[in-house]
Structure formats: structure tokens, C-alpha cells
Image (tube, rainbow, N blue to C red):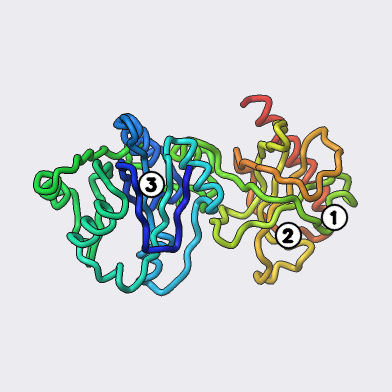
Amino acid sequence: MFYIHDTGKIRQDKPSIVTIGKFDGFHRGHQKILREAAAGKTGERQVVVFTFSRSPQMVLAGREGTSLNTRREKLALAERFGADGVVEYPFTEEVRRMSAETFLREILLDQLQACEIVAGPDCRFGYERQGDVAFLEEKARELGFSLHVVEKERYDDAVISSSRIREALARGEVEDAAAMLGYSFGYESEIVHGRRLGRTLGFPTINQEIPREKLVPALGVYAAEIFLEGQRFQGIANVGVRPTVSGGNGTAAAGMETSIFDFHEDVYGRRVRVNLRYFIRPEKRFPSLEALREQVERDKEIVREYWNRA
């Protein structure tokens, strides 16, 4: 799969089926769009995911945001769900002021060689979001490309959206988030050194730094599913700032530490994927390390019961 980013000079030599959107999370709605796009592949056609390197909404609001996935994770998901390439186009001032007509002709049709465009019914692009499905339908007849509008995917009688998934994660509802994403929310990164507090208390942990670009869910304790070097394990994870140790002054960056059940190897420096499967309780400060140890023992029993039911 090819990946093009941070350049406005693209020249594809193969006809493309282009999907347009933010693709934050590659949730089940995005997967549906990619499946429909992949179904139209014939000959040399390639499926291209077109998005922006920075969210236009965040740029216009003058602030940075977090994503449901890191860039590395997004690319892996795009390939997994059928994309042949991903384009992260720079959202410059010139692009912001570009008309929908110019955007369609110069970027999608000329640079990407789009012979088909696949999008959701709320697709909008161009200056002041002038380009919509009605615009694309008119231009498809005029310019000779195909248009495929994919209806929204639903969960629990409501449309699946990235904002809805974010809200679920903010409440610790990781099971609902997974149902909308089509996979479990979690973190993949290198295992780093921690404070070795867990080892002192009798439950060694692996530690991960949460990437700055990635959303942090409700702080607290979760049942966790761990993937390490091709093996799957069960365990318990804490997402938070460790207020009992740090003092809980609100300035510490959130991180994640995970205790893997029945596992005692030294894995520092290796990459690990930890999925959050079930929310146990919010993070809180304890009066002593002994009180923390006792709570962790109770948490582990709850998690083991969860895995016995799962």
C-alpha cells in the first residue's frame, strides 16, 4: 500500500476509486465505504483513501485535537479494510479557499485520476463546504466519473460517528466503542521503564506512554487483552496519572500500565498491543500503598471473573 502525505503535488498513473472523509477511527461506517469501493475494483483500478493531514475543523478553530488512532494505526487499518493507498493532503490556506469545482477537477480528477468517488451522504468539501452529494451527482454526469453514495452504518438505533465513539470512550464504555469501531480500542507502542511500583506491590506491570496524538479514554482500571509477539494474553490495565504516587496534581501526562496474568518475562523495549475490553472503576487516590495493593487485588478478581464470562 502506498502512502502520500504533506504534499500538494500528486500524480497517479492508474485510475482510482477515491473515498473522501476524515476517517478518524476507521469505524464500521468507514469500513462499509471501503468495502463498497473495493467491490468496484477492476483491471488497474486502485482504492485510494483521501483525507487531510490535519482536521480542517481543528485548523479553522485554531487548536490541536486527538485522534482515535495514531497515524501508524490508521495506515494499518486502511490496508486491512481494502485500501491500496492513503493520501493525507495538506490543509493549507490555498486549499481552504479552493472552490469545490477546483478541488474536484484539480485534486480528485487530475492528480488522483478518480474514475469513481465513493462517499457518505454527508460528504462536504471545498470553500465553505460548497461541495456536497448533489454537487457530485451533477458533476458526475457532466465530467463522466461514477459516484457511489454509501448510507450510514448504525448501532443501537443511531448513526455511528467518530464523535459518538469518543463520547462512549470518555464514559469508559469501551464495549459500545468496540461495537461501533468493529474492533477494540487500545494502544500499541513500545514497552518503557516505569517506576517499578507494581513489582514492589507484588504485581509486575508493563508500561506504555500514550501518544500525544491519540485520545485518552476515561481514566481508570480496565480488563485488558494483550498481544505480544504473536501471543494473546489476558490482564488488567490502568489508564491514568497514578495519583497515589504522583500526588494527583493534574499536571502529569496520562499513561498506561498493564499487569499480564501468569506472565513473568522481561519484555522491556518490545512492541505490545493492549486493548481495553471492560471498564472496572475510575482512577482514584488511595491513602497508602497498602490500600492501593488491596484494591488492585479486588480489581484482579473482578477482571478474572470478566474473562471467565467472556
Question: Would you place residue 93 above or below residue 31 in this image?
Answer: below
Q: CA distance from mark 3 to mark 2?
A: 39 Å
Q: For residue 197, which numbered disc appears in the image? A: 1
Classify residue 306 by image quadrant.
top right
The residue sitting at the front extreme is 13
The kind of residue on which mark 2 rests is: Arg
- Where disc 2 sits, the SS reads loop
- Where disc 1 sits, the SS reads helix
Is residue 149 shown left or right of residue 78? left
Q: Nearer the viewer, mark 1 or mark 3?
A: 3
Quarter placement of the C terminus: top right
Q: CA distance from mark 1 to mark 3?
A: 44 Å
Q: Where does label 2 land, which residue?
A: 242
Q: Tell me which residue sits at (63%, 52%) in the image.
A: 282
Observer-nearest of 262 and 306: 262
Q: Tell me which residue sits at (49%, 36%) in the image.
A: 80
Q: Tell me which residue sits at (73%, 41%) in the image.
A: 299
The kind of residue on which mark 1 rests is: Leu
* CB within 8 Å, label 3 to label 2: no
* CB within 8 Å, label 2 to label 1: yes
Is residue 189 shown left or right of residue 94? right
Observer-nearest of 119 and 84: 84
Q: For residue 49, which numbered disc appears in the image? A: 3
Q: For residue 286, which numbered disc appears in the image? A: none
Query: Which numbered disc flags the more N-terminal residue, 2 or 1?
Result: 1
